[in-house]
């Protein structure tokens, strides 16, 4: 029997053009000896957008769109839309309960391009760890964020991971009650956070994360790439569909030009002018200021619920 690899994304109609680019790049570079089921979590999408993404389907690759609106009904009011993070980022926390048929899955953000064989990521020897992920490079290399991870969240900054590229061991995720503990925390406390679901995952799964080379989640920073450049993740505020000087942005355009969303992507690029750019750059400065404030706040993970 041919092995099937389940791969999850989350999106809304605003981000679906970039999801299409990510999916196309994944399919183009995946080993064709396996079957792949790409599952896109959402809370309602335009049928025409769904149809365009499904144009990527071919032998060995199935794309499903799963509306999880009803599953989030009782919890969605607690989700925060913070800076450049959309509430769709929370959806990955519910995969374990919504898809009991899977023991292990890959989760990918939509603002990335896959350049390597995704099956190699799925086969990582993660043992009984809950997550497999690469360290968050911006946190590792920014003093304000190192303090945020260490002091506010009680997580080692060098082991603080980016949640945009994950292998999730769903068996351990369920056994350790990660989803239930997340719901308990988000409903009981109103933490001031910079990276909402990512902070919860790092806190709840700390010491149970298999660390990847950054080549599996290379952020657009001037840092050496560890191993092959398998995934380029435009995780910071500068996106290649808004800025022309994004490191590794050429990989995005390589696939964007082949996308049925290309005219819309170009329209968005030209509409992003000096005013929008200034606002984004001020937000980036505000994030650093905010990180300093959270670090000295009394309303943090480490002070309210402890480091261990």
Image (cartoon, rainbow, N blue to C red):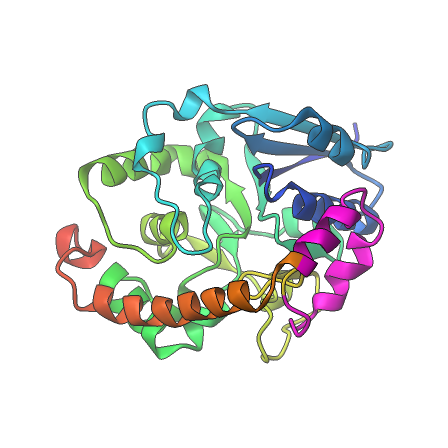
At 31% from the left and 39% from the top, the residue drawn is 182
Is 211 drawn above or below residue 11 in the view shown?
below
Say left or right for 95 vs 201. Answer: right
Specify whether residue 275 is painted magenta. no
Is 60 drawn above or below residue 269 in the view shown?
above
Q: Which residues are magenta?
A: 243-270
Say left or right for 140 vs 230. Answer: left
Question: Is residue 291 or residue 177 the one in the foreground?
Answer: 291
Question: Is residue 168 or residue 144 the one in the foreground?
Answer: 144
**Residue 281: percent from left, percent from top:** 47, 70
Viewer can see residue 166: yes
Quadrant where the N terminus lies?
A: top right
Numbered-mark total = 0
Specify whether residue 265 is painted magenta. yes
Say left or right for 241 vs 160. Answer: right
**Residue 259: percent from left, percent from top:** 80, 46
- The answer to which quarter of the image holds residue 308 is bottom left
At 32% from the left and 65% from the top, the residue drawn is 149
At 22% from the left and 68% from the top, the residue drawn is 293
**Secondary structure that dominates the magenta span:** helix
Is 149 drawn above or below residue 104 in the view shown?
below
Viewer can see residue 308: no
**Residue 95: percent from left, percent from top:** 49, 32
**Residue 71: percent from left, percent from top:** 43, 22
């Amino acid at each position: 029997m041919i092995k099937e690899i389940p791969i999850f994304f989350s999106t809304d109609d605003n981000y679906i053009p970039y999801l299409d680019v990510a999916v196309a790049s994944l399919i183009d570079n995946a080993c064709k000896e396996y079957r792949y089921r790409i599952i896109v979590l959402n809370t309602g999408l335009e049928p025409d957008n769904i149809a365009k993404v499904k144009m990527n389907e071919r032998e060995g690759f199935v794309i499903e769109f799963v509306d999880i609106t009803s599953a989030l009904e009782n919890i969605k009011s607690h989700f925060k839309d913070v800076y450049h993070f959309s509430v769709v980022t929370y959806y990955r926390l519910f995969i374990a309960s919504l898809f009991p048929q899977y023991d292990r899955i890959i989760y990918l953000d939509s603002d990335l391009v896959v350049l390597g064989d995704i099956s190699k990521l799925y086969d990582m020897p993660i043992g009984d760890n809950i997550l497999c992920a690469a360290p968050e490079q911006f946190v590792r290399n920014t003093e304000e964020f190192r303090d945020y991870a260490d002091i506010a969240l009680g997580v080692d900054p060098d082991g603080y991971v980016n949640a945009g590229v994950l292998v999730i061991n769903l068996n351990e995720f369920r056994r350790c009650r990660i989803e239930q503990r997340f719901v308990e925390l988000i409903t009981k406390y109103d933490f001031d956070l910079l990276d909402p679901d990512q902070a919860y995952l790092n806190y709840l799964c700390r010491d149970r994360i298999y660390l990847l080379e950054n080549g599996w989640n290379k952020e657009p920073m001037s840092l050496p790439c560890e191993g092959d450049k398998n995934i380029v993740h435009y995780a910071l505020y500068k996106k290649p569909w808004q800025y022309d000087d994004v490191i590794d942005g050429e990989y995005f355009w390589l696939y964007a030009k082949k996308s049925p969303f290309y005219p819309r992507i170009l329209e968005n690029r030209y509409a992003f002018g000096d005013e929008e750019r200034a606002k984004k750059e001020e937000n980036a400065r505000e994030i650093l200021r905010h990180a300093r404030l959270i670090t000295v706040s009394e309303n943090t993970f480490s002070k309210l619920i402890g480091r261990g």
